[in-house]
């Protein structure tokens, strides 16, 4: 075991290998009692089938035969379970059919396989890595000896077989083609293949093609999912050969076509008129934040090189107008530079921006363009997932009735778009009008109507950013570092929700509530000049860039084809934020304007040595589904701690309905921590909102419920959701729900014991290196379909 002072702290990532069967909800998580299964005989049969397909694939001409196994998993017709429910099982046994296309599909994730597709006959095409196949063979040979939980994973599996050629090619199509005559065809490769592996496959396929028959590969491409394909002119004879020889080919078919509805020309970007002061080795690798604002000049001498792309809303001014967009974008790119008393020197940029022009003037944003712009960017630039909205309406309660209603409907659309497309949106809390004095002077002005949040800042699925004063200057109203900026608007949000969520440096104002040189924060104007200006608009980009950093870092612990959910990023930022430390007269104002404080992504790079953070993300299939995630809490650490604690942060992005204005969200996630599957749940700290999509709870791990004991390293977190309100009547929502949690273990005793050494010593530590992979059979996590 490594010495504690030499141990490198790490973050632990939980995945599908740490999930128990979703079908074990009944009985408090007890393993189902199966009836009529000879586990020893079943294990030998399955092991022999696995060995057989392995040998057959290795004997094939597939060039990836040593790297990937794509095989057919055949289900049993039904599973018999013992039940005490006399209504459904009068004889004590109930039969359940196996459906790999829905509830039983998760069995493969728990077995360490990836589900690729399910056939019309109910068989499953799965991917098994070679090292995992050897482990499965070893396990199944001993299936009669292993525990009931491991046996339960295999209950639905009958056997394994080769994927037949007819699942790769439509024989009717082939028969319709002229022999020895090339035809336009598409070769779809199996998912999970790397670019180099696809190149290897291409060489093998090209070797089959005959030049004398004018066969050739004419194009290559990659789907949104990451699956690669090739287009070419191929004869039916070669198509048949490819389907028989290569198990790494998923499908062969004629080109897919559809009517072109509309098209949009790509935006061309001019080179910068002058180079930036600092050189960046690889700008293309930087995280991206889309900036919906007044636009940035295409020839901006500093920012142009950091531009990822551009979008111009049809209803907008059409060209960049004013300095606001450039200032916000510079805060995304360069953060919060502090030039002190010296001249401004452009630092190294750490972010890129996507320029979205949605303004009708230097001061006005077209609200109707906002969600349309998000949709357009997502459709044309899928690598852009973080969006910054540094604007808001007037305070919601000051809007006339019709505008208030219509703006809330726009916010509803924003929340539901985030739910559908898994986006991370940051909204500025907004500013009070310059020069306006509150009836109660700062910092007692938090109930003044002019300081209340507008519509956009009340979005449930977005994160709202408030503002504080980081650097003090003569002449400023705020004279204590860290106190809220005088102009930043305050919560609560819709349904008394805890808004704003976070805060960042936005500068100060004069006692007359006006801006003044030296009281702001640094940013670039449209003319490439560094200026200091105050505003919550310029705090929000700092939160957006931290979200982009965190998403990029978490992408590194995702398997190919997967990505971190936005809710996973939210949960992590909530857990690791630096909380405000405001006391005295400004304490109440801080509680309603600074949220959890300053978001930090740095702990993903430099984890703290005194605590241990564990992260999980997953999909709840519906309100009846319960995700049951095993949580490693080393017993040796638990015994040696004076005060072992667990802080649990859970985040999700529910669909919303503006009609249920007392809830807004239509789904509520619940979380339960248990010392064992059969134990009662622990009670954590109180608090939380009735419908806001965040749980932040701390548990004293020594305060166990009655009858619970701890004698092992594995605890359990159960997650589920309830539909608490009707959905918006104009949209059909998928029942799937993304959810994520981040748990932090620590000892709050006088001489705290770090959990890092004990966690890293667990045998399961080697599996805690990546986040879960979404099921391959699901094209997108969630889908929103308009009702005709």
Image (tube, grey):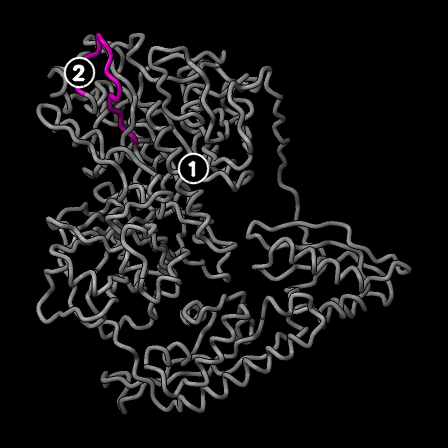
Q: Nearer the viewer, residue 553 or 784?
A: 553
Task: Name the residue that disc number 1 marks.
Answer: 386
Q: Majority secondary structure of the magenta segment? A: loop
Q: Secondary structure at mark 2?
A: loop
Residue 68: which quarter of the image?
A: bottom right
| Sequence-wise first label, 1 or 2 | 1
Q: Position of residue 768 (x, y in %)?
A: 37, 59
Can you tell which of label 1 and label 2 is closer to the viewer? 2
Say which residue appears at 20% left-offset and 60% top-offset. 637
349 to 510, vertically: above or below: below
Q: Is residue 22 magenta?
A: no
Is residue 717 visible in this depiction of the protein? yes
The number of discs equals 2
Q: Is residue 473 magenta?
A: yes
Q: Position of residue 721 (x, y in %)?
A: 28, 57
51 to 331, vertically: above or below: below
Q: Position of residue 306 (x, y in %)?
A: 52, 27
Q: Position of residue 626 (x, y in %)?
A: 30, 64
Q: Relative to 24, is 480 on the left or the right?
A: left
Say which residue appears at 33% left-offset and 81% top-offset. 147
30 to 371, vertically: above or below: below
The stretch in magenta equals 465-480
């Amino acid at each position: 075991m490594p010495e504690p002072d030499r141990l490198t702290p790490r973050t632990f990532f939980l995945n599908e290998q740490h999930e128990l069967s979703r079908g074990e909800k009944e009985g408090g998580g007890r393993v189902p009692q199966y009836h009529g299964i000879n586990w020893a005989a079943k294990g030998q049969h399955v092991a022999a089938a696995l060995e057989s397909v392995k040998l057959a694939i290795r004997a094939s001409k597939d060039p990836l035969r040593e790297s990937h196994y794509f095989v057919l998993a055949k289900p049993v017709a039904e599973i018999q379970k013992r039940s005490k429910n006399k209504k459904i099982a009068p004889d004590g046994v109930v039969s359940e059919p196996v459906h790999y296309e829905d509830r039983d599909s998760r069995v493969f994730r728990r077995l360490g396989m990836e589900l690729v597709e399910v056939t019309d006959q109910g068989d499953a095409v799965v991917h098994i890595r070679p090292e995992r196949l050897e482990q499965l063979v070893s396990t199944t040979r001993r299936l009669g000896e292993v525990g009931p939980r491991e046996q339960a994973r295999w209950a639905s599996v009958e056997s394994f077989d080769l994927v037949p050629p007819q699942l790769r090619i439509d024989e009717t199509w082939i028969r319709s083609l002229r022999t020895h005559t090339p035809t336009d065809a598409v070769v779809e490769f199996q998912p999970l293949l790397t670019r180099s592996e696809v190149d290897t496959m291409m060489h093998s396929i090209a070797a089959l093609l005959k030049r004398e028959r004018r066969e050739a590969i004419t194009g290559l491409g990659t789907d949104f999912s990451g699956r690669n394909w090739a287009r070419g002119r191929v004869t039916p004879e070669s198509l048949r050969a490819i389907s028989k020889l290569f198990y790494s080919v998923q499908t062969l078919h004629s080109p897919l076509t559809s009517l072109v509805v509309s098209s949009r020309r790509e935006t061309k970007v001019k080179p910068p008129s002058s180079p930036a002061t600092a050189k960046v080795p690889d700008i293309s690798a930087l995280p991206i934040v889309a900036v919906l604002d007044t636009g940035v000049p295409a020839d901006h001498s500093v920012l142009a090189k950091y531009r990822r792309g551009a979008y111009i809303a049809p209803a907008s001014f059409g060209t960049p107008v004013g300095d606001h967009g450039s200032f916000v974008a510079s805060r995304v790119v360069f953060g919060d530079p502090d030039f002190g008393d010296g001249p401004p020197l452009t630092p190294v940029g750490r972010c890129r921006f996507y320029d979205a022009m949605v303004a009708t003037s230097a001061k006005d944003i077209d609200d109707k363009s906002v969600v349309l712009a998000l949709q357009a960017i997502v459709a044309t630039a899928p690598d852009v997932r973080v969006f910054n909205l540094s604007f808001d309406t007037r305070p919601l309660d000051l809007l006339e009735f019709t505008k208030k209603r219509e703006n809330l409907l726009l916010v509803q659309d924003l929340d539901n778009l985030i739910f559908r497309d898994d986006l991370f949106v940051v909204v500025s809390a907004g500013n009070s009008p310059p020069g306006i004095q509150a009836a109660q002077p700062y910092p007692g002005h938090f109930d003044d109507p002019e300081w209340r949040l507008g519509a956009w800042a009340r979005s449930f699925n977005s994160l709202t950013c408030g503002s504080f004063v980081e650097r003090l200057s003569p002449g400023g109203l705020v004279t204590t570092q860290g106190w809220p900026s005088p102009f930043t608007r305050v919560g609560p949000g819709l349904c008394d929700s805890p808004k704003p969520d976070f805060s960042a440096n936005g500068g100060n104002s004069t006692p007359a509530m006006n801006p003044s040189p030296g009281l702001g924060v640094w940013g670039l104007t449209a003319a490439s000049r560094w200026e200091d200006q105050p505003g919550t608009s310029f705090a929000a980009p700092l939160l957006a860039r931290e979200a982009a950093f965190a998403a990029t870092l978490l992408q590194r612990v995702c398997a190919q084809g997967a990505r971190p959910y936005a809710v996973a990023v939210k949960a992590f930022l909530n857990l690791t934020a630096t909380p405000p430390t405001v006391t005295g007269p400004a304490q109440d104002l801080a509680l309603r304007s600074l949220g959890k404080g300053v978001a930090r992504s740095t702990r993903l790079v430099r984890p703290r040595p005194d605590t241990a953070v564990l992260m999980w993300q997953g999909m709840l299939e519906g309100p009846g589904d319960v995700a049951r995630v095993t949580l490693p809490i080393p017993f040796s650490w638990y015994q040696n701690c004076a005060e072992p604690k667990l802080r649990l942060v859970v985040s999700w992005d529910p669909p919303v309905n503006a009609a249920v204005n007392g809830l807004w969200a239509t789904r509520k996630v619940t979380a339960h921590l248990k010392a064992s599957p059969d134990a009662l749940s622990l009670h954590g700290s109180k608090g939380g909102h009735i419908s806001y999509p965040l749980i932040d709870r701390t548990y004293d791990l020594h305060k166990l419920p009655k009858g619970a004991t701890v004698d092992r390293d594995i605890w359990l977190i159960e997650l589920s959701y309830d539909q608490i309100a009707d959905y918006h009547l104009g949209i059909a929502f998928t029942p799937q729900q993304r959810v994520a949690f981040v748990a932090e273990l620590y000892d709050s005793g006088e001489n705290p014991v770090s959990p890092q050494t004990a966690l890293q010593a667990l045998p399961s530590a080697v599996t805690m290196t990546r986040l879960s992979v979404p099921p391959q059979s699901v094209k997108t996590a969630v889908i929103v379909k308009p009702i005709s």
